[in-house]
Image (cartoon, rainbow, N blue to C red):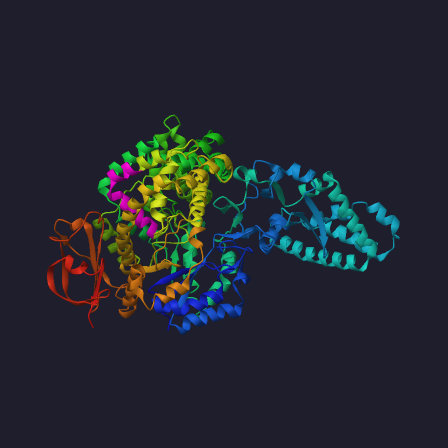
Amino acid sequence: MKPSIESTYRLQFHAGFTFRDAAAIVPYLGALGITHVYASPYLKARPGSTHGYDVIDHSKLNPELGTQADFDAFVDALQQHGMSHILDIVPNHVGVATNDNTWWNDVLENGPASRYAGYFDITWRGSPRPELHDKVLLPLLGEPYGDVLEKGQFRLAFDDGTFGVYYYDRRFPISPRTYAKILSHRAAELEQSLRPENPDLLEYQSIATAARHLPDRSTRDEGDVMARWRETEVIKRRLGRLAVSSEPIARHIEANVAAFNATPDLLDDLLNHQCYRLSYWHVASDEINYRRFFDINDLAALSMERREVFEATHAFVLSLIREGKLAGVRVDHPDGLYDPKQYFERLREAGVEYAVAEKILAVGEPLPSGWPVSGTSGYDALIMINGLFVDRANEAAFTRIYHDFTGDSTSYDDLVYQKKLLILDISLASELQMLAYQLDRIAQRGRRTRDFTHNALRHALREVIACFPVYRTYVDDRGVRDADVKVIDDAIERAVARNPKTDRSVFDFIRDVLLLRASAGTREEQRKFAGKFQQVTAPVTAKGIEDTTFYIYNRLVSLNEVGGEPAHFGITPSELHAYLTDRQKRWPRALTPLSTHDTKRSEDVRARINVLSEMADEWRKRITRWAEINRHEAAPDRNEQYLLYQTLIGTWPEGLRPVEEPFVKRIIEYMRKAMREAKVNTSWISPNPQHEMAVEDFINRGLHNDAFLDDFEPFQRHIANVGRANTLAQTLLRLTVPGVPDTYQGTEVLDLSLVDPDNRRPVDYEAREALLKRPQDDPKFFVTLRALHARREFPGLFTDGEYVPLEINGRLHEHVFAFSRNFKASIAVVAVPRIVMGVDEWTGTTIRLPSMRGRCVFTGNIHEFNGGDVPVENLFEQFPVALLVTER
């Protein structure tokens, strides 16, 4: 019998944490109360991968994580403890940064004539440059192509019947049709050294002729593709045998290879006839013609909408499902897929009963109801729970403080718009360009639209994408949903408002094409354009907001989380109740995390920073004082300082003084990453070492400045004390609200990690196992352990149980959040405090409870309620949060 998915525990697999390591901690996870391990991708990835998202072979386990036997032992350990696991899978893309991806290598060798050409999302004829037609642009050179060529950094090589060109360790196959260029070089010299009737010479000439007459790379005819592949294999085998058996032939090939390597013109001509064009990495943003994961050149997108691609990439995972070794999947980045709904339908048809989508929802945006999934991976729940502990009453005050301190009053919405435009200009310009060409071709088919210029269409597209209010829409072969019409209309109107001098008819044309109702072009052409458009808005939103704006708009950085909208300053209890009530009705088995491998800062760091929202006046005084104390000529800009001080508040370990160097190093590395992501004073593409060194010096000075530390530490200690209440409250909510609680590795205890790689540091499981014997030593661990055991004690109560908000009355009614879960004869009551700065006693505040005889899982106390108002202090007098379950 399969264990019910009651809770998950995320494990990050890599060479330093293998299947054996995971198997070793299964007894601990079982004792903690976990039912399912939630595994990071463990299929064969790029060698050295620390995350597994750069899969190069979907049919194999990652050998760096262990053998098949090691994996089976891990699965057996889970089953012995009544557990199972779900897997993070990556359908959108594959890793192409090494020589190991056989599909990609075949495409580079054969172009559109490759058996796998349709597996990748490549625009073979999208460029206005004819010389790029039927080629893949590979922007990976460290210098311009001509410099690399003339410095001799390309090296042609021959091995076992095949030719390839090397650039350092990377090998690029030579198209078999161009073997003749190499073999025929200095042909007269070979003929003079061997008799005309020499069988080796005749075989050599026959091979060259066969190569020359292979079907052209531009062919897409299936018969020609297979003929080219069969003939190519024969040519390679023949050439390999000949080179081994004939020393004169081997010497001639070796001399020809040397001649090409010594003559840039020869090598240049050979490379110009390949199915790819090697180029400087800077070229990627403008001209790359294969879809990527965001702007990462090393991750090439798959055409997952093709049935054969789905089957080839999922056969192994689906076999694990059928064999009972795997309970379900978390699907990474479904918004990158051409047709997400179709994809999830295929998963369901293939027998996947539990699938959650890593779908980023805007605040108030529903998950498409037609998707056959169990919900999202839970960023929406994370945002809502976190927001409960932000004091909305102080929003205006915090906005003034931030604007006064930084001197910048740019609104969040304007900043998002600006940074989306920036991404479209520097990172994803090639994607925009391809879209514009596609739209232009449609426009040219209509007499009312053919006068729209390419530039006008590109400009309007750029503006619409920058104004898009969600990640993407889901227009597909079935048509346009009402929700998508509203989103597209909203984006068009926003774009028009920001561009009063642009002819509105261009924007209206874009709207009509996206809604499949334009007079120009066929419905199929419009559908294809809408599909590609949707695959662009998602990465632009992610890069523009999560990876740029979230590192600039620092008003209260605990709000700057994946799926969050920092302009929304906090969540009221009634808003959270409404969200959770709906979640129980629609998605009761969606994941509920507070920290993930992608979060910008851990749940406990956010819990501390949230406290600042309750003390605006004191915060203003402190940062003004710290800026004066740490004043220095080479200081970071004021916005960077504002981020730094919040980061120190959130991450400061207890008893740190004197400040330890590992902590200083972590903060320096984090600030460097944050500044590069912000792209204001430095960036990944154009680092500014001078500014980065100045910030590093500022951090070093500040963290060894007694005047600063004397003022900072008492204030931070007060924040941390209040933050503990937030930590316990949000932890209990994660474990009891509708959904499947997900614990990120190590966060069952207080964890003060920042964004990756900081949050992927090794976890001390020995220390956590020791807590099983004395859980009261760590309050967060204690709450986690007892709540997870309650879930196991009352199966169905927290997954299928009705969610009922409980009424709070009295002067502090806004400072308590409470609900019950009701399932058959079982009842659970949950109550937590919120916004507790200055709350010394709960006198006069009551909670209306149902009739029940309940046991508090934290204190062991038995409570009997006859229904009606109960003083809140009765629940909180011995422990800061309360979970009562029906006494059995």
Where, by quadrant of the figure, is residue 282 drawn?
A: top right
Q: Residue furthest top?
A: 501
Residue nearer the viewer, 824 or 440: 824
Screen quadrant of the N terminus: bottom left
Reply above or below: 774 against 577: below
Q: In the displayed structure, does residue 51 sit left or right of residue 487?
A: right
For the C terminus, give its image quadrant.
bottom left
Q: Main secondary structure of the magenta part?
A: helix
Q: Is residue 48 left or right of residue 350?
A: right
- Callout count: 0
Residue in the foreground of this view, choosing between 88 and 517? 88
Q: Nearer the viewer, residue 176 or 217?
A: 176
- Residue 353 visible in the snapshot: no
Residue 405 counted in the magenta span: no
Q: Residue 886: x percent and y percent?
A: 20, 68
Position of residue 852 in the picture relative to residue 170 (left or right): left
Q: Position of residue 587 (x, y in %)?
A: 31, 57
Is residue 239 visible in this depiction of the protein? Answer: yes
Q: Residue at x 10, y 60 (%)?
A: 868
The picture places residue 531, in percent across and down from the top left corner, at 44, 45
Tell me if residue 610 is in the magenta stretch. yes
Residue 100, given in percent of the width and then of the height, sits at: 59, 55
Q: Quadrant of residue 464?
A: top left
Q: Which residues are magenta?
A: 604-622
* Towards the viewer: 572 or 179: 572
